[in-house]
Amino acid sequence: MNVLMPQLGETVAEGTVAAWHKKQGDAVEKNEVLLDVETDKAATEVPAPVAGVIASVLVPEGKTVDVGTVLAVIETDSAEESEAAAETSEEEGAAKSTPRSGGKRASPAGRSERQTAKAVKMAKAKGRGGKSGRLRLSPVVRRLLAEHGVDAQEIAGTGRDGRITRKDVLGFVEQRAAAESKPAAPEPAAPEPESRPAPAVSQAQPPAGAPGESTRVPFDRIRRVTAEHMVHSKSTSAHVMQAVEVDFSGVDRVRLPKRQDWRSKQGYSLTYLPFIARATCLALRDYPNINSSVDGDALVLHPAVHLCIAVNLNFEGLVAPVIRNADSLTVAGLAHAIHDIGDRARKGKLDPDEYSGGTYTLSNNGSYGTLMTGAIINQPQVAILSVDAISKRPVVVESPTGDAIAIRPVGILAQSFDHRALDGAYSAAFLQKVRALLERKDWSDEV
Amino acid sequence: MAQLTYREAVRDGIAQEMRRDEDVVFLGEDVAAAGGVFKTTVGLLEEFGPDRVRDTPISEQAIIGAAMGASMTGLRPIAEIMFSDFFAVCWDLVANQIAKTRYMTDGQCSFPLVLRSANGGGSRFGAQHSQSVENWAMAIPGLKVVAPSTPADVKGLLAASVRDPDPVMFFEQKSLYAVKGDVPDGEHVEPLGVARVVRDGDDVTIAALAAMVPRALKAADTLADEHGISAEVIDIRSLVPLDTQTLFDSVSRTGRLVTVEENPRLCGWGAELSSIVAEELFWDLEGPIMRVTTPHIPLPSADALEDAVLPSAERIVDNVIRLVD
Amino acid sequence: MGNTAAAKKTAIVQAPGIDQATRLKLYRVMYECRVLEQRAYDLFMQNLVKGTSHLALGQEAVAAGFGTAMRSDDYTFCTYRGHNHTYVRGVTMTSILGELMGRECGLLRGKGGSMHLTSVEHGAMGSYAIIGAHLPVAAGAAWSAQYKGTGQVSVCFFGDGTTNIGAFHEALNFAVIWNLPVVFVCENNLYMEYTPIDEVTAVKNPAADRAGAYGLASIVIDGNDADVVYEAACAALDKARRGDGPSLIEAHTYRHGGHSRADPGKYRPDEELQAWLARDPIPMYRKRLIDLDVSEAEIEAIESETDAVIDQATEEARNSPPPPVDIAHIDVWADGSATWRN
């Protein structure tokens, strides 16, 4: 089985092999750490997808390769799987001789087809095919296998003739997730509203299609709606991005002492995000044209801030539910609201009207270590703020006694605004206000 | 809540709307003095008088043409075509005139009318008085198509059809006329274009219309009791406008769809539903979509023959088992 | 048609009540119809009108006679040969030519075309292109007027070929038994499409000879004489408005061209064509006006005014852009949408 370079975030196209924990010939257990991978800011451990022996290590430490590149091949030990491994070895040769171009994601279906091909052999070996001797995978099973990075041969089918059902895949994934729960990852350097399980590597791992072949994967409903919204927004608004760098040490003066207590009482982490949301709401009071929407040739100013929080549904789509009257909430109130709405969004428990009526949007990509994101405006709003990774960096600090270099938590806030509605100076003044609040406001009353 | 027959609900639905709106008028063959050949309109002449409830000659083109002309000049006519098979003799008025004229005239006129008809098999009338033709109507842009399965829906959907600003083909399933059911007291209106989940289930979605709904429910009982299969049953109720979301919500959970229709096999409405689901929900499917239909034959008359060819609960069960097994 | 000259003479004698203003109006409307149809033909030849079109050159007296006699809120239902019947209700030449040319200024913005001219605000309730369909529809509009007691009358024009289709018979019977205020007008131009009507019809006068079957009077008029048509129209409209029910009028006339754009009309004997051209309703009526002491100058004023209007309308239509493509996707339903699913 091939071990692939995972995609660590939507905007990431390549990764660097930081360190191998195993070498060729080593035996590995399933989920045992195989190597470390780094992108701009994030580092992730890549576990072994199956138990077996490392047949070959293809990418040396320090080398940066496209997402989807084969990093190593694990030879598995069961009879059926060695047949599959033989097949992957052929692919490996092909992968080596034909470098993937552009780091494009191969489609899940491509993977599914390969899996089907393997499944055919497996079915022959086990003699559990249908009338035609082929083990058939239903569309939903193919999709789920691809989405969860599961190989069909890992699952025992309970359907007719041993066919794999949707329930079989979901059950397998659940069991695997339980088995994979590991010691907590290092605290993310980003203002994630709650600590989330590190994404299963296999989830982020883009499936590789056979070299030279392209596969067409129809959009599902969420993908299609998202696509329409995004294109509509891009063709409607004149997007301009502006960013400021913010020193979060003022926030940390309040946040760090409270963090432990907060977590034990509330059950989730006190992150930077509610502070940023609070500063945004306060700044919007002074810059009302940003809390608005374009209607024909008029700007409609909204009296209250209904703040949308972009929520990633475990890579199965993106939604932006609304916190109503967010400008009436303190940092603590916003932390509660952000946690609640994200939690319910992921569980699919939001009412439809909780998705409508927003006046400004915060998008948080920090958990993947991104530096800066040019977000697409959530129509009919006129601006969106992207929060990216906040990490410790050397900063020049000026003081009456002279300049000094200090280590400070720093992150970039990037706003995309609609140039139809406002000009750059107005947006810049707003960002300056947000930054000033985050750096100078006394936050001790708010938490 | 009153217990009414499907037949009585037709009359109640018409009467409710005629009391509400003087522009509602009603015409058809044998509908006034005789109260309809299926006795669906008994008492309307007495209550509303001969100006509003009118018998016509056996002239289907005249009936539908008159309804069209009246609707485009301010009335809201309800016209009855005795058997839906007879739409074939006046289809020009339905398909070319009523359906197209709003579009062709750049939206200058509307046709707020209802064409009611007794549709479908099961009454041993033979091939020319038994066909289910809702798929004919569904194929024509500009027609709304409704087919209720219960007395409450007869009344509520008929009321909504009368109030709708567009032409509605309202198919009453004649073998259901004697079926009784609860109908809400007072004014009752059900929106068009909303399917109803009539039984919850996890393993398979059965989409049915009119007389096929009770058969699908019976099949679901059998599937649960004897085969441990949990079937969700959806009453489509309205083919145009079509509630795809209710269908999607169900099929995306169950991963399987079986449609049950009285239409002969080719180009029945189940084919359209199957196509939509295949295009838009393919990656949620756990097996092929199956259609249970009448075979591609005219309907025979003898009870033994008719019962053998119309979709039955047993046939639905067999298809579901083949799919879910 | 040997008796048409006599009919014409009789008409003049029988129409002393037509005042000069009405006569001038009849002439003006006929002349307008003529230049409009002629211009439509010219635009075909320039390939600016696409598709098919059915001209009523030669049949102007029927449209003008009824159009002048009708009340402004009466209803007109006509066929695909309906440019004139629509025009006489007050629709502009620009919007008709624009529709023929598929332009945004068209009466239906290009969504209907030549065969479906409609202007509800002018009482022109549609041009129907399936033979016979609109007779029951016209009866339905008459039912609506009867039910509401508005005094409106529905007038339905159709060709001789329509008399052999079922809807004709259903509609006549239906209108009579419900005593509806509707006037059925058969424009008998002697040919159904290419085939002479008398070769395919059991009776000599295809409409009038069937009237008796529905208890109606048999009425045949000279459809090329605007005065005769106008008088017959007034009588039938009055009857309908009084509550005395429908009429069926057969107006004998002749189309100068073929059935449609594709038809040069070569199947017609030359002497027949020449005889009818000699009875062209417009020169015939012009001569009558002169005989009735209307000055040449007054008539020429009407003609030159109309010539200017048609030229301007042609320019306007030619300069109008094609309709926006997105209107192809609207107005299937009364809410303006074409949505059939959620």
Image: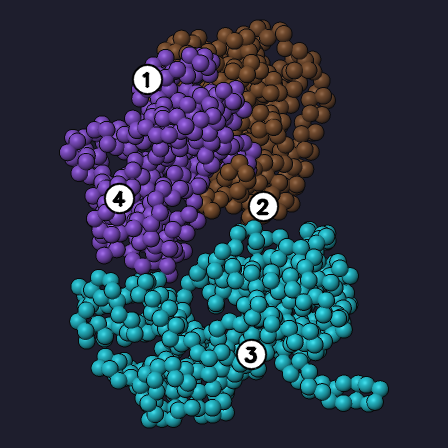
Q: Which residue is mark 1?
A: C202
Mark 3: which amino acid? Glu
Mark 4: which amino acid? Asp
Q: From the image, state the color of chain C.
A: brown
Residue A380 visible within the image? no
Q: Which residue is mark 2?
A: C323
Secondary element at tag 1:
loop
Mark 1: which amino acid? Ala
Q: From the image, state the color of chain B.
A: purple
Q: Chain of mark 3?
A: A
Q: Position of residue A128 (x, y in %)?
A: 19, 69
The residue closer to the viewer here, C16 or B126, is B126
Q: From the image, state the color of chain A.
A: cyan
Q: Chain of mark 1?
A: C
Q: Residues within 10 Å of mark 3 (few under 14, many from 20)?
A: few
User: In the image, A373: left or right of A106?
Assistant: right
C-alpha separation, residue under disc 1 versus residue under disc 4: 64 Å
Residue B221 has which mark?
4
